[in-house]
Image (cartoon, grey):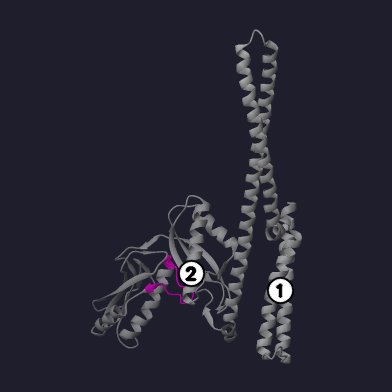
Amino acid sequence: MKLYSYGIILVLVLAITGGIIAWLGDWLGSLVGKKRISLFGMRPRHTSRLFTVAAGVLTVFVSLAVMSAVSRDVRTALFGVEELKQQIAVLDGEVASRNAALDDSRGKLAEVERQFDFAQTTLRSAQDEVRRAIRQRDQARFELANAEWQLGDYRQRIAAADATIAEMSKTRQTLADDIDRLTKFNEQLKLGFDKLKTGTVIYRAGEILWSEAVRGQHDVQSARQVLNRIMNSVNASILEDLNIKSDMQVVWADGEQLAAAGEKIGGGDGSFVVRVFALGNVVYGEPVVVGISVYGNRLLYKAGDVVYAQTVILGGDNTPENVLTAFLPKVNAAAVASGILADPVTGRVGIISGEEYYRELTRLRGMSGTVTVAAVALRDAYTAGPLEIELKISQQPAGPANLATIGGRQGD
């Protein structure tokens, strides 16, 4: 808990420090722009940008200075690698010395064993000498075992030192990669600064950025992997739309929404629809803040099912054009009521080809009296949509207009 609090304090200090420096840079840039101050013969506008760049550079240096001041690991990664190499060189020297001592001990052991063999042939006349030789042999073996144990200990220390150097090198490379990524991101934001002033809206609030049907997962971890893949696809799609040749992260999603979506997908079988949409109007140069919605994806209409049907009497205000113009919004409303997801911006769910529309309009113009207009599903339609329809128009016997029929039910 103490280390966790320490990390939070460090992040807050870095954030506050970076914010103060960014504010000062922005304030100085604005002051220079307003007072039209010029440095080094540059234009006031270029002088203002120089202050902004200096604030960004100062933020990096102050962040490294604060991290070096409060973290020994960071200081070691930046400045202590050479010292570790010197320690390894000293340990290598000690290992060489121990190896020499080990060879010397082995030589002594070989000599004692030769003496022991000779003593066996003269056992009756040299019992005391044999006992002494045995003691010397045991002592040499003890020294050999001790030397081998020390050698193993030194090898473990060398392996630990190598692992420490590898970890420090990895940490240093990670810091360097983070600095490069932030630098590239800062340059990209500066390139979009002029376009940001124009207030060009690239995505409207509620606009669907990605919609995909996925299978339910058996655990939350697998569901999170599916969501991470979708978010990476959204990020890549936006970068491609904006013609940005980079792997920078421009999409930001709320962690709680991601967790809730992962639990929903990971806790059920069947099919789900994952929709990623813009939470607000997005201006070029701003990060794209998105929301995530998850819906159950089920079959709502089979191919050939009637989505909506209505019987009308042609004539007067009920011209063929007016009849079809009023009919299609009712089809859309019926589909939405059945559960098909509409586009949040346009409110539409259905698709009908222009050729189909004008062909049926031409047929309707050739009819008179009572006719029935029906919207029929062209293909199987699920919650995710879209609903593709075709029009079926038929002439009815003369008589009063019947009530509208929606999916086989009578309605107003």
On the image, the x and y values in percent for residue 62 come to: 73, 69
Residue assigned mark 1? 58
Q: Is residue 184 above or below residue 37?
A: above
The residue located at (69%, 14%) in the rendering is 129
Of residue 205 and residue 180, the one placed in the foreground of this image is 180
- Residue 302's quadrant in the figure? bottom left
Q: Nearer the viewer, residue 78 or 256?
A: 78
Q: Which residue type does callout 1 highlight?
A: Leu
How far across and down, in percent of the image, does residue 204 sit?
52, 77
Kindly identify which residue carries mark 2.
236
Q: Nearer the viewer, residue 5 or 291?
A: 5
Check if residue 342 falls in the magenta segment. Answer: yes
> Dot 2 lies on which element?
helix
**Label 2: how many residues lie within 10 Å, few (<14), some (14-19) or many (20+)?**
many
Rendered residue at 70%/47% (across/down) = 90
In the rendered image, residue 210, in percent from the top left (x then y), is placed at 47, 68
Q: Main secondary structure of the magenta part?
A: loop
Q: Is residue 275 left or right of residue 331?
A: right
Q: On the picture, is 83 further left or further right than 245?
A: right
Task: Write the start and end of the magenta stretch as one range.
Answer: 337-350
Task: Locate residue 51 relative to residue 257 in the image: left or right.
Answer: right
Q: Which residue type does callout 2 highlight? A: Ala
Quadrant that contains the C terminus = bottom left
Q: Residue at (76%, 60%) from the top-left corner?
A: 70
- Number of marks: 2
Q: Position of residue 259 (x, y in %)?
A: 57, 58
